[in-house]
Image (cartoon, grey):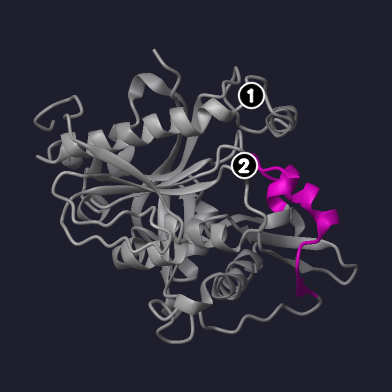
Amino acid sequence: MGSSDQPVHLSTKVHTIQDGREFTKQFLRPCLPCSLPLLRRCQFHLKQQPLTPDAEICLVTCSAGSNMQDAEASNHEAVNTSNDPWLAAHIDLSNSGQTQIWTFASWEPEFSQHPNPAAAVQASPQYPVYQTLFQALFQHLRKNHISKIGDSPPEQWQRLKAEGKIVSEPFSKSKVLFGTIAECLWPFLQRDRISREDRPYLKYIVSSEAQHEPIQAPPTLHFAKMEEQHLQTMIDRTNIPRTLETLRQLPSIGLFDEDNRPVAWGLLGKDASLSSLHTEPEYRRRGLAERVARRLLTEQRQFYVDADSANLSYEDRSGGIVYAHADVSDSNLASRKVMEKIGGEVMWRVAWIEIDLGEG
């Protein structure tokens, strides 16, 4: 355990990021691949229009000893010129029952591939500082986000429950779901406040070398976008809590038969993770999931080039995105095999953890 189980008394500041492109360039890109989920979520945020009114990219810093300029400046000249720890997040609490918060902490690269990341981070002399940054984020969520939410379950949460998706009951507006959160950050989500926990998932990272192969559909099948009439089928084939509204926003691809019936499909999540790969039973063991996954890597490039075309050079070293990623359950052997076939490598473990930030 670190030098103290309680957050130390440091002066912290939560910066609301106005210039997302500059923020990703200064803070997230240098930390790839560990920062990849939040980087992609921020890029999706930049592309998504109109934005949810209270969606926010924020940066939590310790003001003492920091040379970082005010990230709230209109021209966003924030630069990180010190070694002080920092914590970044994308927040959108409108997605009740679905992933609401993506995070990245500056200390993740140090601990993410440790044999026991949670124990290692708790043994760090900086652990109390890390705790303080998370406590500042929690207080920001209470004051500036949770306080704006109504007390009654929103319609989308009720639909997820009615469809048998994973939601924690009873509903509480103070419950917030952190998605794909790295194992070295688990200790900061207080155990006595956890209301839902889905883990472990393996974080697969796919490098650019695996993303350039042209992918063709097999005979009698063809690739096409999953259209409106197919979205409910996608929802019905998985227990992942997503609404029709969410699926309409996400890049998806399917393999269709000669009758234009989808027989295999997948999508990219808001953080560009390869997700919801599915093959109908009569078409399994033909390598269709692998083809869909590879095609989605191409879709990722098109989607994110459009979102961040002015600043793609940091990744676009050979005509494609350097990193892609997926979260695969430790027990999902079929999906793990697909990820290995497309060149994926397990880099760290993640979880979906919901905590109740209600006072008291």
Residue that carries the numbered disc 2 in the rendered image = 240
Question: Is 199 within the magenta?
Answer: no
**110 lies above or below 97:** below
Question: Is 239 within the magenta?
Answer: yes
- Choose between 107 and 149: the one closer to the eye: 149
Residue extending farthest to the front is 74
Quarter of the figure that contains the N terminus? top left
Image side of residue 146 versus residue 265, left or right: left
Give how far across and how far down residue 324 sits, in percent: 47, 66
Give how far across and how far down residue 305 sits, in percent: 55, 75
Q: Upstream in the sequence, badge 2 or badge 1?
A: 1
Residue bounds of the magenta highlight: 221-247
Cα gap from disc 2 to disc 1, whole angstroms: 24 Å
**274 lies above or below 178:** below
| Location of residue 292 by image quarter | bottom right
Is residue 6 visible in the rendered image? The answer is yes
| Location of residue 96 by image quarter | top right
Give how far across and how far down residue 9 sits, in percent: 17, 29
> Residue at (78%, 52%) from the top-left corner?
231
**Mark 1 is on which residue type?**
Gly
Image side of residue 63 versus residue 56, left or right: left
Image side of residue 323 versus residue 145, left or right: left
Determine the secondary structure under disc 2. loop
Residue that carries the numbered disc 1 in the rendered image = 150
Residue extending farthest to the bottom is 318
**353 lies above or below 344:** above
Residue extending farthest to the right is 259
**Mark 2 is on which residue type?**
Ile
**Marks 2, 1: nearer the viewer:** 1
Determine the secondary structure under disc 1. loop
